[in-house]
Image (cartoon, rainbow, N blue to C red):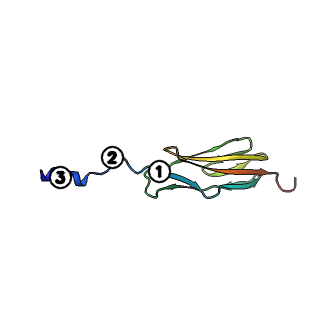
């Protein structure tokens, strides 16, 4: 009986800590065609077991994103979305402007 109580006290949660949210360091930014801007995602809580995120651009003809680096392709406004493994999201509005001197 004592052994059974000890096991109960030592029982670890069945579910590892899942992300409860994600934020971006910039909720909006402007970038010139041909240049880049870096977005940094922060998954919370700090002890989340899987902090993997995926990135997406709402229009890759205007800007692409790879691991948070947004590359401006053509003028316009797009939304960059970052998503955790359990579908928590954060977004940033990116305005792509004409390259200087054009």
Residue designated by label 1: 19
Q: How crowded is mark 1: few (under 14 residues within 10 Å), some or many (20 or more)?
A: many
Q: Which mark is residue 5?
A: 3
Q: Residue at x 14, y 52 (%)?
A: 3
Find out whether the residues at labels 1 and 2 contact each other: C-beta distance under 8 Å.
no
On screen, residue 35 versus residue 90, left or right, reads: right
Q: Quick one: 63 or 76, which is closer to the camera?
A: 76
Kind of element beneath mark 1: loop
Q: Quick one: 97 or 18, which is closer to the camera?
A: 18
For the view shown, which residue lies furthest in the right direction? 102
Residue designated by label 2: 14
Mark before the other along the chain sequence, 3 or 2:
3
On screen, residue 1 versus residue 63, left or right, reads: left
Find out whether the residues at labels 3 and 1 contact each other: C-beta distance under 8 Å.
no
Mark before the other along the chain sequence, 3 or 1:
3
Find out whether the residues at labels 3 and 2 contact each other: C-beta distance under 8 Å.
no
Q: How crowded is mark 3: few (under 14 residues within 10 Å), some or many (20 or more)?
A: few
Kind of element beneath mark 2: loop
Q: Position of residue 7 (x, y in %)?
A: 20, 51
On screen, residue 28 versus residue 9, left or right, reads: right
Q: Quick one: 40 or 44, which is closer to the camera?
A: 44
Q: How many labels does the image show?
A: 3
Q: Does the rendering let one see residue 80?
A: yes
Q: Position of residue 35 (x, y in %)?
A: 74, 53
Q: Residues within 10 Å of mark 2 (few under 14, many from 20)?
A: few
Q: Position of residue 34 (x, y in %)?
A: 76, 51
């Amino acid at each position: 009986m004592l052994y059974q109580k000890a096991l109960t006290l030592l029982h670890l949660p069945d579910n590892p800590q899942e992300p409860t949210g994600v934020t971006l360091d910039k909720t909006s930014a402007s970038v010139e065609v041909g240049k880049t801007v870096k977005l940094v995602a922060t998954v919370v809580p700090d002890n989340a077991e899987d902090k993997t995120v995926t990135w997406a651009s709402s229009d890759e003809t205007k800007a692409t994103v790879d691991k948070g680096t947004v590359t401006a392709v053509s003028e316009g406004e797009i939304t960059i979305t970052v998503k955790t493994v359990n579908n928590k999201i954060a977004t940033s509005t990116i305005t792509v402007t004409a390259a200087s001197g054009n």
